[in-house]
Image (tube, grey):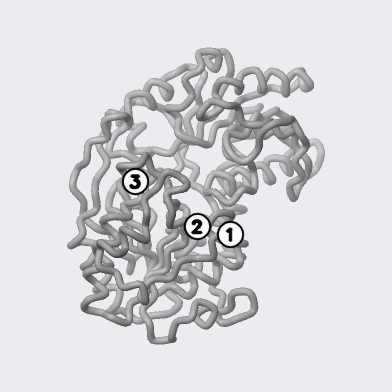
């Protein structure tokens, strides 16, 4: 990009550490890489993935200042001070705090003194009161990451811009081998086994699991009784280490035989796989099982479809707009989220079971419709068509 066409501005990017293998970490890395290439000056304000020191972080298109998380839950206590520290070195640049996280966590009143761009996940049927309060602030510019989020903000009279998450569709493409071995051989399953995959963090508050593991495993337990060649691959940490459920116990209670379940290597589950290896897994799945109580976006649904794999997901929140023709949207019943003061939905077991049966009866292998749908979420395309025009106008 010619020097005279660069975007001039300073951004304190508040999210997970860029590059860690969380959805937020991956999105932070790829967006910051492109921001730097556009000319913006960016620092990372970590709420997960880094602590203890202010350091330089090298990413593909440059080097950025990397601020550690604090000892509070979401690091909003130190965000204003870190933002001032970072921007004091760039007094000639217009600046903003950029948040990629649940908006309700930003409760520090000092944040009201700074301009904020908030890329907002909305995963309920309506906007929770604390989120709505922050969206209405004069210093906040909201970005909806899913069409449903844009609709909810429009209904509330909040002006926003729609910019979805993006993925590298060159990497997330059909791939037959994992670490040099045909993927099904690597997993130890046969070509005619029906492989159902789940890629969902096993994190919860101890009693309620937004990723609907109870409902999904109950449905698979019923499914495998009728279709004994079905195999479930769970790409997650099955222990309660991260506040989630004991999935091994839950699998037994749900009636899923141990021979019909594959769990990842503990190191792969905890620290993630390379994107190319994830693409190989998605390509091997006959279907991705992804219903939940509500998604703000749901990156695995797009990653799987980019690899030509059909998806089963919820028919509400972000998911309802992120499943291509030929995929499956399940039904749910309202569930009150008391802490957030808004409704989720619980996907029903019969509806999930019905979707699994329909997926079983379809032709297997690469699905061209899913792939073409996912191409609209290519990260370069989204940055070029949506982020760059928005950022250029914002920092003009």
Question: Where residue 210 is drawn, which disc sits there?
Answer: 3
Judge from the rendering whether residue 188 lies leftward or rightward of residue 353; answer left or right: right
Pick the front one: 208 or 183: 208
- Alpha carbons under labels 3 and 1: distance apart: 24 Å
| Residues tagged 3 and 1 counted as in contact (Cβ below 8 A) | no
- Closer to the chain start, of discs 2 and 1, is 1
Pick the front one: 345 or 72: 72
Quarter in which the N terminus is drawn: top right
Q: Disc 2 marks which residue?
A: 376
Residue density around tag 3, few if under 14, some if 14–19, many if 20 or more, within 10 Å: many
Q: Nearer the viewer, mark 2 or mark 3?
A: 3
Say above or below: 110 vs 279.
above
Pick the front one: 51 or 131: 51
- Closer to the chain start, of discs 2 and 3, is 3
| Residues tagged 2 and 3 counted as in contact (Cβ below 8 A) | no
Residue 117: give x, y in percent of width and height: 54, 29
Q: Nearer the viewer, mark 3 or mark 1?
A: 1
Say above or below: 280 vs 295.
below
Say above or below: 229 vs 282.
below
- Closer to the chain start, of discs 3 and 1, is 3
Residue at the (42%, 49%) spot, across then down: 240
């Amino acid at each position: 990009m010619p020097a005279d066409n660069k975007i001039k501005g300073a951004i304190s990017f508040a999210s997970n550490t860029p590059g860690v293998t969380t959805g937020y970490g991956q999105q932070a890395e790829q967006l910051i890489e492109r921001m730097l290439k556009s000319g913006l000056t960016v620092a990372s304000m970590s709420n997960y993935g880094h602590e203890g020191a202010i350091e330089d972080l090298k990413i593909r298109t440059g080097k950025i200042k990397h601020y550690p998380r604090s000892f509070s839950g979401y690091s909003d206590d130190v965000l204003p001070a870190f933002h001032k520290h970072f921007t004091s070195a760039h007094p000639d640049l217009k600046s903003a705090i950029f948040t990629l996280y649940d908006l309700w966590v930003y409760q520090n009143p000092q944040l009201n003194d700074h301009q904020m761009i908030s890329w907002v996940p909305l995963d309920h049927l309506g906007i929770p009161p604390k989120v709505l309060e922050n969206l209405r602030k004069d210093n906040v510019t909201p970005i909806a990451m899913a069409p449903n989020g844009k609709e909810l903000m429009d209904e509330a009279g909040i002006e926003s811009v729609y910019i979805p998450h993006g993925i590298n569709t060159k990497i997330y493409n059909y791939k037959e081998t994992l670490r040099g071995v045909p993927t099904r051989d690597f997993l130890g399953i046969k070509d005619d086994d029906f492989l159902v995959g789940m890629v969902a963090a096993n994190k919860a508050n101890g009693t309620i699991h937004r990723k609907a593991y109870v409902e999904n495993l109950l449905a698979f337990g019923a499914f495998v009784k009728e279709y004994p060649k079905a195999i479930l691959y769970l790409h997650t940490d099955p222990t309660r280490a991260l506040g989630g459920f004991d999935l091994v116990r839950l699998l037994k209670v749900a009636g899923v035989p141990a021979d019909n379940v594959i769990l990842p290597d503990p190191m792969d589950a905890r620290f993630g796989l390379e994107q190319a290896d994830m693409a190989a897994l998605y390509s091997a799945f006959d279907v991705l099982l992804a219903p939940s109580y509500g998604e703000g976006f749901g990156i695995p649904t797009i990653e799987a479809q980019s690899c030509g794999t059909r998806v089963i997901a919820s028919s509400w929140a972000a998911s309802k707009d992120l499943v291509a023709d030929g995929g499956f949207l399940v039904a749910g019943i309202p569930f009150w989220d008391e802490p957030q003061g808004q409704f989720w939905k619980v996907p029903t077991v019969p509806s999930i079971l019905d979707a699994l049966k329909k997926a079983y009866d379809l032709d297997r292998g690469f699905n061209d419709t899913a792939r073409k749908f996912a191409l609209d979420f290519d990260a370069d395309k989204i940055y070029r068509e949506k982020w760059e025009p928005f950022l250029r106008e914002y920092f003009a």
